[in-house]
Amino acid sequence: MTRTPLIYAAVAAAANVIGALVVATRSKWSTRALHAMIALAAGFMICVCLTDIFPEAIERSGARGAMAALAGYLLVHLTQHMLAPHFHFGEETHEVTELVSFSALVGLLLHTFVDGVAIASAFHVSAALGSLVFIAIVLHKLPEGFAIASLFLAAGAGRARAVQAGLALGLSTMAGVFVTDAVPALDAVGLGLSAGVTLYVAASNLVPEFQGKRDWRPQLAFVTGCALYFATRAVAGI
């Protein structure tokens, strides 16, 4: 196992924890800044998914890669609607039950595990693709940690448990890297699986968070995320 994917996964995992810490250590935060971050991440993720991850998955695995992408998309959809129907990428302002917060954590653990699979699979193709996938993942890790910690606090959990929830998501990401390296079959369909999950998170989770808001800033941030993707791709020489 090469160390590079694991190092990048560790950085992504740290972003989950930082997002949770932001919620646990501050009494107030900027909702506008959160929406801008979510929009920026959505733009970048959609671009990298449709332009790089999905085409590479088809090139490597053909129809199996396409089926893996569909499976990834459906898996996240079913998980979120069955296990965590209350979850959204943003501040939880209503009181929720402990079961709701735990269910959301279980659903996100699956998603963050696939994040690790995506990082490992992409780096197995090339360092450039791995870097693009890493940026796409780390951009939504902060609001992800923010969201799960917010849910735990809304359920009455203490700050320590809220941060631990963010840490669990980070550890799941690193586990995805280990398992991908240990299971060749997972590596073979890893890009397809991550394409489906990335598309769902970006288009079905993140975009709705700012889509209906009458504020030009999130919309500009979304376009900026797309522009950032193409600038990063140019720098990477892809």
Image (tube, rainbow, N blue to C red):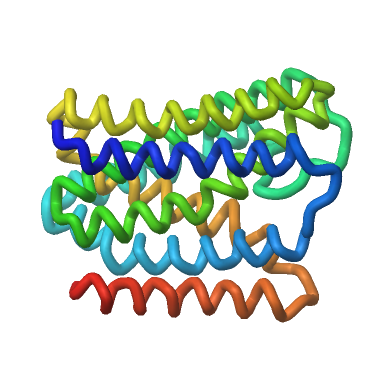
Residue drawn at x 66%, y 35% is 148
- Find the residue positioned furthest to the front: 25
Q: Is residue 238 above or below residue 123?
A: below
Q: How many marks?
A: 0
* Viewport quadrant of the C terminus: bottom left
112 to 152, vertically: above or below? below
Q: Position of residue 77 (x, y in %)?
A: 52, 41
Q: Nearer the viewer, residue 41 or 57?
A: 41
Hey, which quadrant is residue 165 in on the image?
A: top right
Above or below residue 231? Residue 125 is above
User: Which quarter of the picture shows residue 82?
Assistant: top right
Could you tell me residue 146's position as x and y percent? Answer: 66, 43
* Residue drawn at (19%, 75%) of the image: 237
| Residue 83 visible in the picture | no
Whether residue 202 sits left or right of residue 97 in the image: it is left
- Residue occupying image coordinates x 28% and y 33%: 177
Residue 55 seen in the figure: yes
Residue 193 percent location from the top left of the image: 31, 43
Name above or below for residue 71 compared with residue 38.
above
Left or right: residue 177 compared with residue 126: right
* Quarter containing the N terminus: top left
What percent of the width, then of the height, locates residue 129?
A: 23, 59
Hey, which quadrant is residue 213 in on the image? bottom right
> Which of the pair 139/109 is nearer the observer?
139
